[in-house]
Image (cartoon, rainbow, N blue to C red):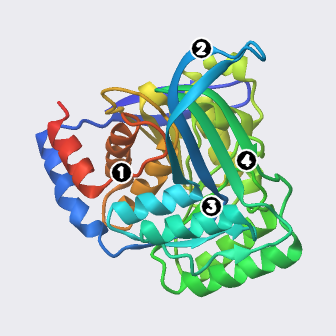
Amino acid sequence: MGRFIWSSLEMSKTFEISESKAGPAEKKLLTEKLQLFKGKKVLIVGDVGLDEYLMGEVRRISPEAPVPILEVEKEDSRLGLAANVAQNVQSLGGIPLLVAVIGQDSGAEALRNLFHKHQVSAEYLVVDPTRPTTRKTRVMAKHHHLVRVDFETRKFISDETESKMLHQIQDSLNQADIVIIEDYAKGAITQSLIKKTIALAKEKNKQVLVDPHRTNSANFYEGVDLIKPNFEEAVALSGLNYDEMRDHPNKVIEVGQAVQKITGAKQVVLTRGKDGMTIFSGKKLTQVPTFARQVFDVTGAGDTVIAALALGMVSGLSLEQACMLANFAAGVVVGQVGCVPCTTQELKDYIEQTV
């Protein structure tokens, strides 16, 4: 363990710096702890959507316009956004309690069918017939995205819909072990909803984790226990200048510290792609390496990380261990195409096989 002196024009702060190592003993502990995920209940509040895929090959250009013609070989539909977080909780052995808003349309029907297929309860969904169900249609030639077509509205939910969501949150909190707020900026997550959810969770002594969106400021999430932005999101949330931050590795500390101060979060988990994670917890800073061997598609990796992180935290793992486990889980899903969940067996095998 070393010491790092961070300073700016206004203040200086001393951090305890450490780096996680995934040696044989640590990997053995993590695989043993996986069995403790079973039955843990995670309340997930957020935006949900339907991920649709049209996949095939491009062999020619259209005579009608200079665009490729995709010869479709396969169509697929998957749970997206916060629904993918719920699916990851379920596939890792936990029980997701999902509070979200859907419309009254074909997209909602398709989502409900997928929830049933993947054993994710739709009990706490709120229907708002004035809003379309979010759908994202990706057109892909092999592993390459040609175009994405979105069906959605991005305005905040009405007071009436928010009230219905809060009723479902209050009802499901009695069962939950931990809470995840998953914000994709589609409108389900308002600042009022966050504040009231945090207040309800504190009454029940439940931790609240948030996966934020870069379009909001950090004080939008004030009061959460843990916030998990990626580096670009953290810069945007803190109001700092991205061009100044990205070229200076030591600026990671300034960014994380700013987010921690503005939100009042006890912990900030800063995900940094190939550079792993940086955990800010009080005056302690811990670096967790990445465990991805190959990367085909990062879509949905953040969903897997927050799901594994929450399950690890309520299963007796330290935050450092939970983050290490979450990075292993991310390594599983980025090696596949599209939003796919990480299963317990895949995670166990990946941990054991990673050198």
Reading the chain from its start, which is encountered first: label 3 or label 1? 3
Sequence-earlier tag: 2 or 1: 2
Say which amino acid is labelled 4. Answer: Ala
Instruction: Judge the density around disc 3: few (<14), some (14-19), many (≥20) Cα neighbours within 10 Å.
Output: many
Disc 2 on helix, strand or loop?
A: strand
Type of the residue with mark 3: Val
Q: Amino acid at mark 1?
A: Cys
Q: Earlier in the sequence, mark 4 or mark 2?
A: 2
Could you tell me how far apart the alpha carbons at marks 4 and 1 are, in whole angstroms?
Answer: 29 Å
Which residue is tagged 1?
Answer: 342
Query: Would you name the residue on which mark 2 appears?
Result: 60
Examine the rendered structure and indicate whether residue 263 appears above or below residue 43.
above
The quarter of the image holding the N terminus is: top left
Instruction: Please state which of the two labelled residues, at mark 4 or mark 2, is closer to the viewer.
Output: 2
Residue 225 quadrant:
bottom right
* Contact check, label 4 and label 1, Cβ < 8 Å: no
Q: Amino acid at mark 2?
A: Arg
Residue 343 in view: yes
Q: Position of residue 294 (x, y in %)?
A: 34, 26
Residue annotated with mark 3: 224
Circle 4 residue: 218
- For the residues marked 3 and 2, what is the alpha-carbon distance in whole angstroms? 51 Å
